[in-house]
Amino acid sequence: MPKMFSYLRKKLHIHVKESKRRRARLVSKDGRCNIEFGNVEEKSRVAFLADIWTTILDLKWRYKMIVFISAFLGSWFLFGLLWYAVAYLHKDLPEFDPPVNHTPCVENINGLTSSFLFSLETQVTIGYGFRCVTEQCGTAIFLLVAQSILGVIINSFMCGAILAKISRPKQRAKTITFSKNAVVSKRGGKLCVLIRVANLRKSLLIGSHIYGKLLKTTLTPEGETIILDQVNIEFIVDAGNENLFFVSPMTIYHVIDKNSPFFEMSAETLVQHDFELVVFLDGTVEATSATCQVRTSYIPEEVLWGFRFAPIVSKTKEGKYRVDFSNFNKTVEVETPHCAFCLYNEKDTKAKLKRGYDNPAFTVTEIPETVEADETKM
């Protein structure tokens, strides 16, 4: 028992320590932006209602279904009240004891329930035939036309919003996945930050383009602190950055040169830096021709120095290419320079060994010609 308690205490201590070290991130691993807007003016809130279409599309499914159900139930109940008011004003209800030869505005409306049912039948064009509008009341005819037009508008808007949300390219982005970690290792003789990305569908993303942003807190020479300062990170693919043939998993990489923000980082100091690397993939969905954007982010703890990705693509005996996604996030430790500055110094040293250099401390002593002449005479 004491050993078990000590083990649990140790695990709890590690968990608390890791939770304290956990960094805030702007972009989650699945691409959602973790940002909160505070003290928004009322005028700006009204703008959301002015752009009601985008507001409805951006709602979560549970809120969208609430709006969908409320729109139909609300319109049915509202027009049910109006039909009841028409019957009440025309004295068609049974409590008024109408004469036998009385022609009502709407046949067989006896109260609120029957008014609601007639409103539902009118708007969804069910038309059971038991309740119908007569030609004796112009108000009822006008109300019938108004509800029919409004019902078509509500049907078009709500059904279109649901269809648009289902077919949004945001759903296509879920079938594009990035590696859990980024790695730092040599590629083509250069130190690079490498990330693996894969398309889980066989349909392509047309005109794909990959780029990145490094988010960090910087201090300007004027003493201003800029939070979430953005630095462009150029990612390279061997096949080219534009119009990628994205049919199999690819490894994108960023060269750590003297212009890179990673140049001053090393294997030991990487975790001490406060940054967030956000990677974007833009492309056009082949099936719908709609543009979509996939994004993810990496914090220092998710960048592994001195590793490379395990192979993932192989060729079978039948001549087919096989992608093994079990190795998608696997990494292999490789020999890697301690830092980019060390790699460049090593290259400069090797280059200097191949060249000759004059020694500034070396002096040449010239022999006078007279001395040479005397020596020849002798």
Image: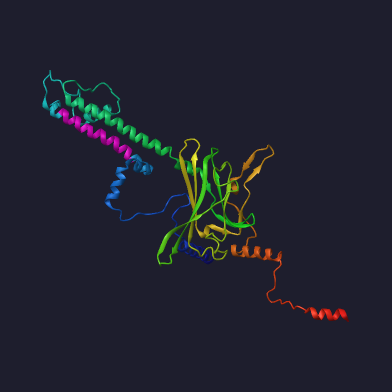
Query: In this rendering, would 158 be left or right of 23?
Result: left
Asked if residue 60 is positioned above or below residue 73 in the image, the reply reads below
Which of the two residues, 232 or 321, is positioned nearer the viewer here? 232
Q: Which residues are magenta?
A: 66-87
Query: In this rendering, would 70 be left or right of 287?
Result: left
Answer whether residue 339 is visible to the viewer in this image.
no
Asked if residue 369 is positioned above or below residue 78 in the image, the reply reads below
- The x and y percentages for residue 95 are 12, 28
- The x and y percentages for residue 284 are 49, 40
Asked if residue 240 is positioned above or below residue 19 in the image, the reply reads above
Q: How many marks overall? A: 0
> Which residue is at 34% across, 32% downward?
156
- The x and y percentages for residue 137 are 16, 23
Asked if residue 258 is positioned above or below residue 161 in the image, the reply reads below
> Which residue is at 42% across, 38% downward?
166
Q: In what quadrant of the picture does the C terminus appear?
A: bottom right
Which of the two residues, 368 or 71, is positioned nearer the viewer here? 368
Answer whether residue 62 is visible to the viewer in this image.
yes
> Which residue is at 64% across, 57% downward?
189
- The x and y percentages for residue 337 are 62, 62
